[in-house]
């Protein structure tokens, strides 16, 4: 464990001010919109963009003289984030449904333009800022994505066995339309990746190496999961579960800590930020495939839901915390490479 350098401290302050500051600021508007009786779905969509925007601002304001940044790609993300924020706030005072629809089109346009701008950046610049597509090993990257999909399905089966809905799960996967929708997900990813990259570039690429450097390999990832969960609080209160938001906060703590373990494991194994981006996309969008709805709001939770999730996610994801990659004897050179 090491202290952060002066530059790392400055980057963290800028990141935290931008990411959490914007989350709190927009959380106030989210509350106003909720109590006006509006649909607040646009707020979580915009919030996913904030972590990467915070990293981008931190890297811009601490860049060394003459340092080349992936400026085209970074500016695309900042402009897309700004447009999403304006549309989200605008929906409070005009038509939330119309602004949400336009916001989706803006994010699609941002994703398409983002791919183009990313390919226009020089390879050495992409490598320096963790934007290359295959990391240390292409085969390992593909395996991690597939492994997460299998773990996601295993988690679903365990949940079905616990609450007695396992037959419904079997029927669901026997339905050809389920597999057709799953086949479409990779195509949709290319049109909507920037929201998931927006989170993972902040949490995994930026925060994970910093926290692991300061608090240790295992504790750093767990602490990151706690922070990641707390970041969701405005969404817990006004979107996911307004009637039982305390339980929603606890559920997100369990979810984010356990997912942080596996996402962190996959990121350390591959050195590829696109691996947790794809896994985050799978985690969020498989729910849409299995329920037939993109609406994740207004759930009612209780202690049973918290405990069941703790047991299931603990069984599925926490064993990876004891894998070889999480040992404290992990080489310092690898840690410094990720933190640089």
Image (cartoon, rainbow, N blue to C red):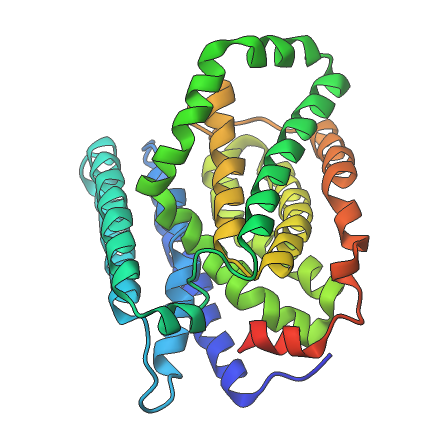
The x, y position of residue 265, in whole percent, is 67, 54
Q: Nearer the viewer, residue 268 or 211?
A: 268
The x, y position of residue 181, in whole percent, is 42, 21
259 is higher (above) or lower (below) than 39: below
Quadrant that contains the N terminus: bottom right
Q: Residue at left 58%, top 75%? A: 337
Image-quadrant location for residue 2: bottom right
Q: Nearer the viewer, residue 54 or 1?
A: 1
Image-quadrant location for residue 186: top left
Q: Nearer the viewer, residue 282 or 308?
A: 282
Q: Residue at left 48%, top 16%? A: 178
Q: Nearer the viewer, residue 256 or 126?
A: 126
Image-quadrant location for residue 312: top right
In the figure, is residue 151 to the left or right of 101? right
153 is higher (above) or lower (below) than 228: above
The x, y position of residue 329, in whole percent, is 80, 72
Residue 40 seen in the current view: no
């Amino acid at each position: 464990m090491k202290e952060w350098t002066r530059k790392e401290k400055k980057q963290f302050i800028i990141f935290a001010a931008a990411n959490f500051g914007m989350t709190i600021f927009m959380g106030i508007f989210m509350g106003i919109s909720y109590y006006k009786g509006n649909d607040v779905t646009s707020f979580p969509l915009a919030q996913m963009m904030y972590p990467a925007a915070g990293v981008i601002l931190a890297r811009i304001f601490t860049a060394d003289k003459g340092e080349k940044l992936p400026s085209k790609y970074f500016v695309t993300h900042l402009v897309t984030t700004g447009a999403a924020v304006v549309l989200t706030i605008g929906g409070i005072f005009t038509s939330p449904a119309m602004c949400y629809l336009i916001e989706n089109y803006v994010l699609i346009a941002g994703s398409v333009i983002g791919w183009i701008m990313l390919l226009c950046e020089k390879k050495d610049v992409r490598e320096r800022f963790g934007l290359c597509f295959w990391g240390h090993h292409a085969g390992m990257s593909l395996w991690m994505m597939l492994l997460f999909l299998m773990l996601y399905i295993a988690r679903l089966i365990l949940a079905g066995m616990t609450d007695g809905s396992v037959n419904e799960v079997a029927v669901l996967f026997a339905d050809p339309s389920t597999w057709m929708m799953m086949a479409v997900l990779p195509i949709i990813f290319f049109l909507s990746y920037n929201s998931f990259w927006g989170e993972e570039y902040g949490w995994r690429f930026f925060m994970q190496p910093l926290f692991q450097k300061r608090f240790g390999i295992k504790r750093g990832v767990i602490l990151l999961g706690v922070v990641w969960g707390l970041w969701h609080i405005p969404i817990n209160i006004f979107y996911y579960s307004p009637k039982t938001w305390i339980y929603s906060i606890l559920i997100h703590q369990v979810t984010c800590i356990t997912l942080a373990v596996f996402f962190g494991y996959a990121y350390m194994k591959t050195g590829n930020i696109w691996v947790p981006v794809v896994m985050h996309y799978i985690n969020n969008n498989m729910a849409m495939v299995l329920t037939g709805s993109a609406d994740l709001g207004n759930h009612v939770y209780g202690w049973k839901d918290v405990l069941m999730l703790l047991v299931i996610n603990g069984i599925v994801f926490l064993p990876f915390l004891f894998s070889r990659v999480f040992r404290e004897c992990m080489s310092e050179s690898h840690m410094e490479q990720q933190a640089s």
